[in-house]
Amino acid sequence: MTHVAVIRGGAGDEFGVSLKNGIAAIELLRDDPSYAIKDITVSPGGEWLHSGFVRTPQQCLLNVDVVLVASHGPYGEGGILQRELMRHAVPYTGSDPFASAMTLNKLFTKKLLKERSIALPRSMPVSKDSDYVRAVQNIEHLFGPQYIVKPIDSGSSFGVQRANGLPELLSALAVAFRKYSRVLVEEFISGTEVSVSAAKDFRNQNLYIFPTVEVIPESGQSFFSQTAKEQNQATFIAPARLSTAQKKEITEIVRNAYQALGLGHYARFDLIVTQNDIYLLEVNTQAQFHQRTPFEEALESVGVSKHEFLEQLLNNARSNKIV
């Protein structure tokens, strides 16, 4: 029997997402007699809880064979949890601390991907304590008039806003700076939104790239927002309605980005396909099991259940264990 600790929660916008994701993973494993599950929650303040009591990480990880990282945001995707697990020599799913931290930070991610000549939307970081009105005027001259404002180190589309024109951009920044000290302003690129999941050592391939999934937001929505994700307000088509050449190019972009970022067992890539180019928008290092997602659509398109994928993820983590 394999003793699996599912760790969910942690500080950041995605605390609620992490709780739901962890519960969904537990439900997938609960009825499998080959697993004994330990449910561990990390509070927004960083306390580890098991069975309703605050415990030390060492107590929580006692006799654990492998950890399923179900935590999102800075704690679970930014390398903090991974460093703690490495200190206790417990194997875990996902990327290592360095790759996690680099990928969560959109500025670092862009820097590494630019070095690989991967097409990215033009962007500029803007700080709350700077003269951001002047910065916005520079942005208007560099790219525009349509923008996306997003936190530099948050996922699940939390805090992401669409702005059209200078007044809306200034308003969006004012809203963002109520919560975040620094954000990224990107040019909004109109095209076909797609999502691609990839997994290492899956189906006898060193890097298995799932079919490209087309994401169609509901009418009236210009992108796959946080609300749309939570309320399943999108249609997914797998495989995406793209040409063979476009799909081949996307596969190469994913392979290139995976290598550049040094990613671990799983990652998902969000891209925009235009008539002339393919732009990489976001990279996510955690799988989601709690809601309808492009990841689930990709699994179904190749006949893989979420339980089967999760089992392979845990096996890969144990085969690469630290101890």
Image (cartoon, grey):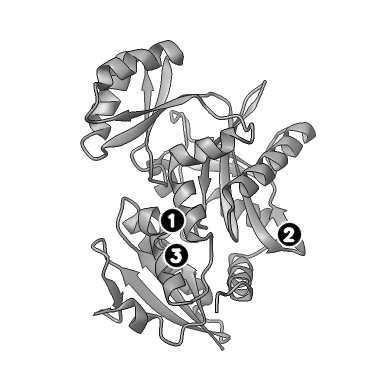
Badge nearest the viewer, 2 or 3: 3
- Which is nearer the eye, 156 or 61? 61
Regarding mark 3 in the picture, which secondary structure is present there? helix
Regarding mark 2 in the picture, which secondary structure is present there? strand
Name which residue lies at 34% across and 77% down.
57
Considering only order in the chain, which callout, 1 or 3, is on the residue closer to the N terminus?
Answer: 1
Residue 306 percent location from the top left of the image: 59, 65
- Image-based side of 228 in relation to 202, left or right: left
| Quarter residue 256 falls in | top right
| Mark 1 neighbour class, 10 Å CA radius: few under 14, some 14 to 19, many 20 or more | many
- Which is nearer the eye, 109 or 251? 109
Residue 193 percent location from the top left of the image: 57, 34
Residue 298 percent location from the top left of the image: 64, 52
Residue 186 seen? no
Instruction: Give, as a three-letter code, the residue at label 2.
Output: Asn
Q: CA distance from mark 2 to mark 3?
A: 23 Å
Residue 174 seen? yes
**Count of residue discs:** 3
Instruction: Give, as a three-letter code, the residue at label 3.
Output: Gln
130 to 263, vertically: above or below = above
List the residue tagged with mark 2: 206
- Could you say which disc has been placed on residue 47 in the image? none
Name which residue lies at 53% across and 51% down.
293
Q: CA distance from mark 2 to mark 1?
A: 23 Å
Tell me the quarter of the image containing the C terminus.
bottom right
List the residue tagged with mark 3: 82
131 to 105, vertically: above or below = above
